[in-house]
Image (cartoon, rainbow, N blue to C red):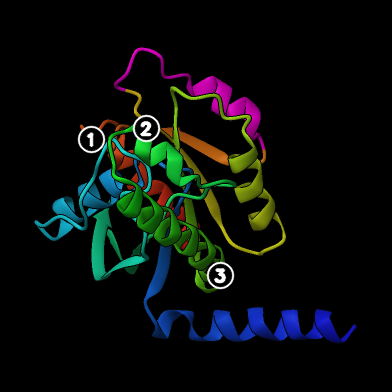
Amino acid sequence: MLSKLKKFMKKFLKNIFKSKKSIKLGLYGPPNGGKTTLANRICQDWLGENMGSVSNMAHETREIQIKEQITIKSKGKEITFNLVDTPGIATKIDYEEFMKLGMKSKMAKKRAKEATKGVIDAIKWLDDMDIVIIVLDATVDPYSQVNITIIGNLAARDIPVLILANKVDLKKANIKKVQAAFPQYDVIGISGKYGNNIDKFYEAVFKLSG
């Protein structure tokens, strides 16, 4: 009973002060789903600058990155939020995988350690999010342990969620498979790299913030 009361009070106070603080919009998902590419797209669209560096190697983003006070506009409305780009969630991070890609042992171990800490921090930050955007690679099977872990962590929290099936510019992209995997959430197919359907994404953010 006490925990339910705490939960109610937290939600009640959150709603009261929501208009007085910047909304935190978090980008979550597995490594190489395109979170930072999307973050850069958003920042380029509204600030004229990038947020972070991208790489084909997993776990390029290993620390929480925040870009404050981004104001987006859609259909005569506007909303301001702090964009939080999180490290890719993984259930296992093995430094040997980095070595296979040509990285030396010392650097690979350092990267794996930083990536592991990044995953832990990303999960901790979930409680601070007002909106969560899950960015998935639409060319990859969505029925993975990592995705189930992310969804499981969100299911217990009262946070608005939107799933983006990213990389629709690629032939292997399968939006319907992503929709079938997570029917409880809205799914929008986009290309963070080229901006396909990015307006639909912005419109969805307005709906979630309302």
> Viewed as shown, does residue 140 lie left or right of 157?
left
Q: Position of residue 102 (x, y in %)?
A: 28, 35
Q: Which residue is mark 1?
A: 193
Asked if the stretch drawn in magenta spans residue 174, the answer is: yes
**Circle 2 residues within 10 Å: few <14, some 14–19, many ≥20:** few
Q: Is residue 151 at all visible to an observer of this figure? A: yes
Query: Residue 111 sits in which quadrant?
Result: bottom left
Q: Amino acid at mark 2?
A: Lys
Q: Which residues are magenta?
A: 169-183
- The circle drawn on residue 25 is none
SS state under label 1: loop
Asked if residue 206 can be seen in this view, the reply is no
Which of the two discs, 1 and 2, labels the residue nearer the N terminus? Answer: 2
Relative vertical location of residue 129 with respect to residue 41 in this rendering, above or below:
below
Q: Residue at x 58, y 29 (%)?
A: 179
**Residue at 14% of width from left, 52% of height from top?**
44
Q: Position of residue 105 (x, y in %)?
A: 35, 47
The answer to which image quadrant residue 157 occupies is bottom right
Residue that extends furthest to the right in the rendered view of this protein: 1
Q: Which mark is residue 124?
A: 3
Q: Residues within 10 Å of mark 1 (few under 14, many from 20)?
A: some
Q: Which residue is mark 2?
A: 100
The residue at the far left in this view is: 48
